[in-house]
Amino acid sequence: MLMRIARFLSNSGVASRRKSELLVLEGKIRVNGIVVKDLSTKIDPSKDKVKFLDEEIAISEKIYIALNKPEGYLSTVKDSFKRKTVLDLVKGFKNNIRLFPVGRLDLNSRGLILLTNDGDFALKITHPRYMITKTYEIVLNKPLESTDSKKIINGVKIGNQKIIVSRLIKQTLKEKTEKIEITIHEGRKRILRRLFNYLGYKVTDLKRIKIGELDLKDIKEGSYRILGDEDINNIFQKNKNT
């Protein structure tokens, strides 16, 4: 069966679909020894030899992992400064299974992050058109004013971008700090830290607790579990019902 080159790379776990397209356009993919830069190129996985970084690529079994990320780990496959990444917490998989994180949590954030070798799955989780919610627990340095709560619910415009929040619950903690549970559909870099900083607050802790309807359950910080079909369905369940 013929398959577009970017889809093949995505299905083999090299990268997400969009990243795979970039790899092709940048001339980093060879098919039968020839560099290809045309996204319309189709290959036959049973016959053609595809290489990335001089390593032959093959479609492997699909793996889906829920990881409870601690602070101090980067949400990337490799780091040029040799800092710790989320892949350092996931061991024991075959070398031909190229796991990568789905979306990101910044270095100082923690909580639920997904890892997979399925590029199509990653696209559905991260692309705005699929409307997959992400829920966070955030601790602020001071109580959130009611006027600011209303601003957040109505949408806050920072520069030329408007940040939309679909759900916000607040709870005052000890020492006049504020714990916020907030749900968004977006995944732009540091979007929630930017939001609260713009309104005059400092985020002292940020933890993602849910993606879709999938939560951390009993996964300890720094640990992970492999997801089954029921877990995958839970990610998309709320979206199906809306």
Image (spheres, rainbow, N blue to C red):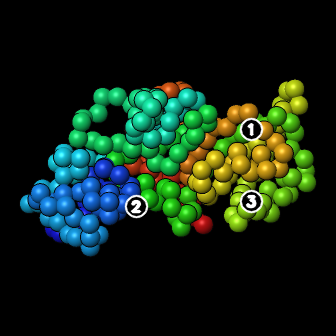
Please state which amino acid type lies under the numbered disc 2: Arg
- Residue 141 location in percent, x, y? 82, 34
User: Is residue 64 something one can see in this rendering?
Assistant: no
* Residue located at (42% from left, 29% from top): 82
> Mark 2 sits on what residue?
18
Q: Secondary structure at mark 2?
A: helix
Number of the front mark, 1 or 3: 3
N-term mark: 2 or 3: 2
Task: Please tell me how crowded label 2 is: few (under 14), some (14-19), or many (20+) other residues with Cα within 10 Å.
Answer: some
What residue lies at 82% left-to-right and 42% top-to-bottom?
A: 201
Residue 203 - label: 1
The three-letter amino acid code for the residue at tag 1 is Val
Which element carries disc 1, helix, strand or loop?
A: strand
Instruction: Please state the horizontal and vertical placement of residue 117, each as a whole percent of the image.
Output: 34, 47
In three-dimensional space, the C-alpha distance between marks 1 and 2, rounded to whole angstroms, equals: 31 Å
Relative to 221, say whether 185 is above or below: below
